[in-house]
Image (cartoon, grey):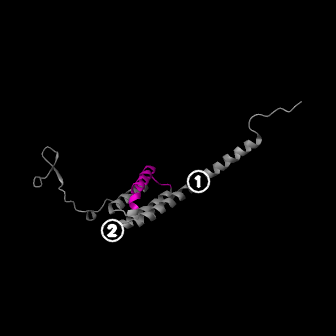
Amino acid sequence: MPAAASSGCGKVALLGCGFLVLLFGIGMIVFMIKANDALIWVFKKVEAEVEKGLPADLPAADRTRLRDAFAGLYAAVEEANVDPAALQRLQGKFMEMAPDIDNGLSVEQVRELTSALERVTGESVEEPRPEDQEESSEPLPTADRRGSPSLSPALA
């Protein structure tokens, strides 16, 4: 009597598929362990590019604050203590500023970037100091008796 033909997957195919699933699982575990290292590596490359584009007139305090913000980001990523929504906004900020980095960033752009970095780690965002802000020549609006904004009478 002839041997019955087998149907479905053979033992070799099952072993091959099982081996691939095992390799995939090991790869996912390695990726999860090394994902933070890869993210830090990317941010260090970005930091190096940002430093090349810093304006010459950037105050030393802002340079220090930027370096501290990057250091805080690295520590937060290593500890897995990062706000994902703020991280996504930071990535958007990097993409928005990418063309300007080669041409040089403005002091205001550096401060915006620093604030975005600080928000990712949950650090308190330091407001710009009044002595660092430029004087505005525009009159400040005041409220008239009805509560609607208007220019002060001396400037109108």
Mark seen at residue 62: none
Q: Earlier in the sequence, mark 2 or mark 1?
A: 1
- Residue 107 appears at what percent x and percent y? 33, 63
- Residue 120 appears at what percent x and percent y? 42, 55
Residue 13 drawn above or below residue 71: above
Does residue 122 appear in the picture of this structure?
A: no
Mark seen at residue 31: 1
- Residue 54 appears at what percent x and percent y? 38, 66
* Count of numbered circles on the image: 2
Does residue 64 appear in the picture of this structure?
A: yes
Query: Is 146 within the magenta?
Result: no
Residue 40 drawn above or below residue 25: below
- Magenta segment: 80-101
Residue located at (46% from left, 50% from top): 84
Q: Which residue is mark 2?
A: 59
Please state if 17 lies on the left or on the right of 3 as rendered.
left
Mark 1 lies on a secondary structure that is: helix
As rendered, which of 128 and 44 lies closer to the eye?
44
Please state if 150 lies on the left or on the right of 62 as rendered.
left
Packing grade of label 1 (10 A; few <14, some 14-19, many >=20) is few
Q: Amino acid at mark 2?
A: Pro
As rendered, which of 21 and 75 lies closer to the eye?
21
Please state if 25 lies on the left or on the right of 103 as rendered.
right
Query: Is 84 within the magenta?
Result: yes
Q: Quadrant of residue 66?
A: bottom left
Residue located at (74% from left, 44% from top): 15
Name the residue furthest top.
Answer: 1
Residue located at (39% from left, 57% from top): 97
Determine contact: label 2, label 1, CB under 8 Å.
no
